[in-house]
Image (cartoon, rainbow, N blue to C red):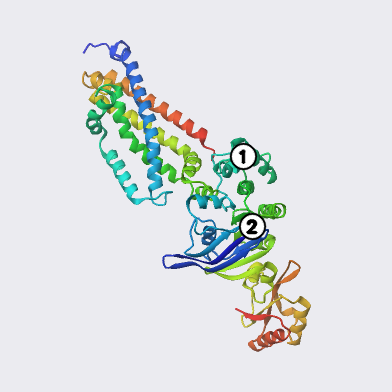
Amino acid sequence: MIELRALRKVFGDTVALEEIDLSVPAGEIHGIVGRSGAGKSTLIRCLTGLDSPTSGTVSIDGVDLTNRSGAGLREARRNIGMVFQHVNLLDSRTALHNVAQPLKIAGIGKAERLAKARELLDFVGLGDRVDNYPAQLSGGQKQRVGIARALAAEPKVLLCDEPTSALDASTTDQILGLIRSLRDRLGITVLIITHEMSVVREICDSVTLLADGRVAKTGKLAEVLSEPGSALAKDLVPLPPVGIDDSEGRLVEVSLAGTDLPTVLTAAQKAGVSAEAILAGAVETIEGRQIGRLRFTVGSAEQSNGLISALKADGIYAEEAA
Amino acid sequence: MNDPMWLDNPAITDQMWPAAVETLLMTAWSTGLAVLFGLPLGIWLFTASKGGLNSNQFVYRVLSFIVDVTRSIPFIILIIALIPFARFVVGSALGWQATVVSLTIGAIPFYARLVENSLREVSEGKVEAALMMGASNGQVIRQVYVPEAKPGLIGAATVTSVTLVSYTAMAGAVGGGGLGALAISYGYQRYQADTMIACIIVLVLIVTLIQFIGDRLARAVDHR
């Protein structure tokens, strides 16, 4: 449904995006994660035709956006619903008229577009708020209106640019639940740009990690996460911070990907390291697989090397942590 | 020195009302016309400016130059310079109708600049959202910029209107009619301090009234 081929975007001397290849099948929720400056915003601007890529192609539902401009581009954009971090509702219009706006732009008659808008506001659970102005709605309600608006023109693709970054945790869950139900009920393809790992964990089927304008990792969520030493896993399942009093100690980080806790402990015992040496650990089950890491503290470099090689002998990924 | 004063002074009792009506008519007409022509000019300025929907540095510089030149000419000089034009438009260089012509010409660039600044206040995100819905530039202007900037546009019209009240008074000096003419011909040239003071009071009342109505209107359309 969404296809990016060899996308490259250069601003002056700065390369913002390089060799971006990405393909999201219909009905999938795909997350794009990365630190700020990784190229997420540039990517979404290229996806929507607000910026044109320096080279490469962007196609959505088989329609190439890269070579379009004017009326052709406007037409193509109607197939894309967009949800923004700051929602961007019109303050001068009620929720109903905000939701109806894409239909007004498309030239749909007033009665028809307002009826459709009312239906959509019902769908997102704001049937009783149709006549409220955005200033009278909470952040989560505004984002619901924003989502209803994005759906008005019945797009095949929903692009969400940091849809929950301005919301608190429980509102975030509600909005993510809404997005998931849209996919389940309407079969819409969703692309979510986010820096919040919780969003990825909650609703993404597949994920792309951007770093320095390149695809650092891409694939199904569980696959990407269970790759040993996965940078994404480190971000997604962070270890709780622990103060270390023994400055002489060495730290060894063990990935649970593709293995389980008892196997790791047995292997560690072979190297003479007991479970008491575990300083911190974080384990989570994502799509039926255990994802997580353990951090051991050991006395010396010899011991840490011994532990790492013992674990590796059993096919467990381990590395010395800084 | 024994001239009748205040409510016995015919300059006040007989002439104040028609003069006030003339001032109101001049202000209303020129505000209306300035908005009618200044709004599109301001939109044009804004869209041509850097980062605008239809950015064009050449067009922007030319428009900007014309606007700035017109705004920097002292109004009293602009009126005199526009006498032939006013005569061409309304058939006479005297009276309030002629003054409306020069007031309008003077106020259009003033309002246009304020419009440009009001439109700049509309957040980029709202515009991008509309563009993403497939809106054309015209739709973005009509459906996003103008409605979202409406409180600011009304505020700008209020400021323009108040400025125009003081311009009408200046126009009085060169045969423009209204309270300015009354204040100058009686209050100044015939030393009638009472007429002068009465004119000032009525002008202050008019300005206060305009400001009150403008604030009310702006608040009524402001849903932020």
Crowding at mark 2 (Cα within 10 Å: few <14, some 14-19, many 20+): many
Residues packed near mark 1 inside 10 Å, few (<14), some (14 to 19) or many (20 plus): many
* Residue B205 appears left or right of B143: left
Front-most of A20 and B33?
A: A20
Q: In the image, what residue occupies the spot 59% across and 66% down? A: A22
Say left or right for A19 vs B23: right
Q: To which quarter of the image does residue A216 belong? A: bottom right
**x and y percentages locating residue A260 in the rendered image:** 76, 76
Residue B89 percent coordinates (x, y): 28, 26
Question: Where residue A34 is drawn, which disc sits there?
Answer: none
Chain under numbered label 1: A
**Residue B1 in sight in this render:** yes
Q: Please give the residue where the numbered disc 2 appears in the rendered image.
A: A190
Q: Residue at x 40, y 27 (%)?
A: B208
Residue depicted at 44% across the width and 37% down the height: B153
Please tell me whether mark 1 sits on a helix, a strand or a loop: helix
* In the image: residue B210, left or right of residue A114: left
Cα–Cα span, label 1 and label 2: 24 Å
Q: Secondary structure at mark 2?
A: strand
| Badge 1 and badge 2 in a common chain | yes
Q: Where does the C terminus of chain A fall, quadrant-wise?
A: bottom right
Quadrant housing residue B31: top left
